Image: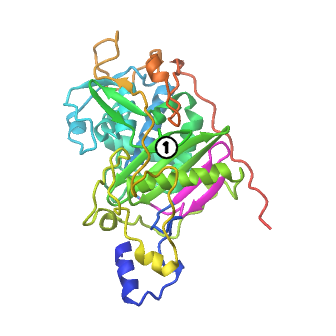
Amino acid sequence: MTVAGLRKRLMGAGMLACLSCLPALSAGGALAGPALLLDAASGRVLYEEQAGDPWYPASVTKLMTAYLVLKEVRDGRLSLDTPIKVSATAARTPPSKMGFKPGTVLTVDNALKMMLVKSANDLAVVLAEAVAGGEAAFAAAMNAEAGRLGMHGSYFVNPHGLPDSRQRVTARDLGLLARAILSDFPQFRPYFGIGGVQLGKKTYQNTNGLIGRYPGADGMKTGFICSSGFNVVATARQGGRQLIVVLLGERTATARTIRAAELFDRGFAGPRSGSRQVEDIPPGAVAFAPDLREEVCGKNRNNLADDDNAPVHAGVAGDDSAIGFLTGATRRSGTRMEGEKPGTLIKRAAIEPIPVFIGPAPGSKPAVQQAAPAAPASVQAFAATEAAAAVAPGAAPIALQGAIKQGKAQPARAAAMPLPPPRP
């Protein structure tokens, strides 16, 4: 039964229901999906809600795609300068996409930037083909890596997160993946916090609405399909601490950003230690991911792109009046992320976009390599321009990284800290 169906049944029964019978509520009384707040360094859980339940990942899938690509670069099987070609299969991938024609050549570096900022599904396929030769083989690699990382509640079928009933993740697993990205690829962290990219005369802002709005926000990735609602894995740093937020199933992009900011506020203001490690979160009580298609994309739903840059009409976040009546929950008051009008966000700080381009890297050989090269070339994460180095207040720290030395494996992630003593 859908959430809307449950609400209708409860109304018909005279609203004689208890809170435990209802889906989880956010702080504002709105229906909420899984949520997780972690300390990035220690992996301690600072807040969790249904974090072991399965969910459709949508485009947060691209975090695993990026992980595998960066692993190839780190280990010397690919270079950021490796030229890769858009196949006919990639060009046919549904939006969101860059829309490049088959045969278009671009570097791994530029494909990664556009995939993470624009959430380009076609470039996720291009990168998957460059790593594994095809989507099926890449999905197998994704699942093998998920198993190695301890993501036991996840299963991947494609590299982009477009709808497939078999594809699933949990908030717990996404927290593990986010920590792995931060610890395994510290030199590549700026990729996940790029505020915008410029391709020719077109500029694309990051779909993550925290970047340029929330102080210290520095990554990672959003996702949306009707069946999943609005998802996000986000990181932010304040006072020497970095926190990770995972939210799944929010009803609009704006609601997703506001709730993520609230969790970050809670984490930075609260204690540094949590009750347990993220890997110790048990599996959820449900076996299948819920389908939110009717609840999220039913009639009278507007502006449902996975994009926090677009204005959102007030009231599209979902009618929570029945839930509020039953539970006494009320809408939260405005937060520092909300604009003057309900359902809007404060204006983003100006962020200088990073230039991207199609074609091979300047000075490289014209031959296109679809397979991983035997040895990497010296590469640079970002163009050394002062414009790209200038970061607006509250924006992600897109600092110039200089040359990335490849071929030497990074140290393994730190072992989990012991559990704290039980609470009295």
The residue depicted at 49 percent of the width and 48 percent of the height is 233
Determine the secondary structure under disc 1.
helix
The residue depicted at 33 percent of the width and 49 percent of the height is 311
Q: Which residue is mark 1?
A: 145
The amino acid type found where label 1 is placed reads Glu
Place of residue 241 in the rendered image (x, y in percent of width and height, measured from the top left): 66, 41
Q: Is residue 376 visible?
A: no
Place of residue 224 in the rendered image (x, y in percent of width and height, measured from the top left): 36, 52
Q: Residue furthest top?
A: 363
What's the magenta region? 35-55
Place of residue 419 in the rendered image (x, y in percent of width and height, measured from the top left): 74, 55
Q: Total marks drawn?
A: 1
Which colour scheme appears in the figure? rainbow
Place of residue 342 in the rendered image (x, y in percent of width and height, measured from the top left): 40, 58
**Location of residue 124 with respect to 161 vertically, above or below:** above
Question: Does 343 lie within the magenta span?
Answer: no
**Location of residue 243 with respect to 420 vertically, above or below:** above
Question: Does 46 lie within the magenta span?
Answer: yes
